[in-house]
């Protein structure tokens, strides 16, 4: 269900894919993240997504203009996972709230893998 902003002149509808793209680009700006992950249904293996497909590793649920986001990420080896996760959450929350005017209810960062250089 898309997010809807009511104004005097009409409604603004923001699709969940737009929110997912903003979240993906915002997450990729964080230090220590290699990329978004997508689960291969046949093998059950996570694969690294290219920049054009970032939204496939993100699930957005919008209800009553409250947004819940689930990010599946792959991190770089040697970074502190908790710190990178907090940075991703802060950056995604800040960018989505500033660009859309909507409030974020919950952001989950699920680390699906670590990539060695």
Image (tube, grey):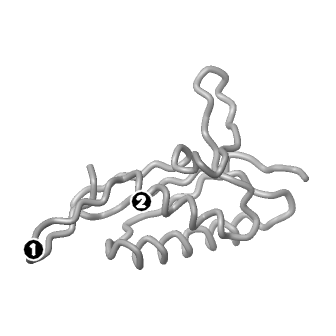
Earlier sequence position, callout 1 versus callout 2: 1
Give the CA separation, mark 1 to mark 2: 23 Å
Q: Is residue 97 above or below residue 41?
A: below
In-image side of 8 versus 116 (left or right): left
Residue 66 in the image, given as x and y percentages of width and height: 30, 64
Residue at numbered disc 2:
19
- In this view, the residue in front, 22 or 88, is 22
Residue at 70 percent of width and 43 percent of height: 48
Residue 106 in the image, given as x and y percentages of width and height: 42, 64
Residue at 41 percent of width and 79 percent of height: 98
* Mark 1 nearby-residue class (10 Å; few <14, some 14–19, many ≥20): few
User: Disc 1 vs disc 2: Cβ atoms closer than 8 Å?
Assistant: no
Residue 35 in the image, given as x and y percentages of width and height: 69, 53
In-image side of 112 versus 1 (left or right): right
- In this view, the residue in front, 8 or 86, is 8
Q: Is residue 96 above or below residue 50?
A: below
Residue 33 in the image, given as x and y percentages of width and height: 72, 61
Disc 2 secondary structure class: helix
Counting every numbered tag in the picture gives 2
In-image side of 53 versus 46 (left or right): left
Residue at 58 percent of width and 25 percent of height: 41
Q: Quadrant of residue 103?
A: bottom left
Hey, which residue is sitting farthest right in the picture?
A: 117
Closer to the eye: label 1 or 2:
1
- In this view, the residue in front, 115 or 26, is 26
Q: Is residue 39 above or below residue 50?
A: above
Residue at 27 percent of width and 54 percent of height: 2
Hey, which residue is sitting farthest top in the picture?
A: 42
Residue 9: mark: 1
Q: Quadrant of residue 39?
A: top right
Disc 1 secondary structure class: loop
């Amino acid at each position: 269900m898309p997010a809807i902003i009511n104004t005097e002149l009409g409604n603004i509808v923001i699709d969940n894919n737009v929110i997912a793209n903003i979240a993906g680009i915002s997450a990729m700006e964080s230090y220590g993240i290699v990329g978004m992950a997508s689960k291969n249904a046949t093998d059950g293996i996570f694969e690294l997504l290219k920049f054009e497909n970032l939204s496939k590793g993100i699930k957005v649920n919008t209800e009553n203009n409250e947004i819940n986001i689930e990010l599946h990420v792959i991190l770089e080896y040697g970074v502190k996972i908790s710190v990178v996760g907090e940075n991703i959450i802060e950056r995604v929350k800040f960018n989505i709230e500033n660009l859309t005017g909507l409030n974020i209810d919950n952001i989950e960062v699920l680390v699906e893998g670590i990539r060695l250089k």
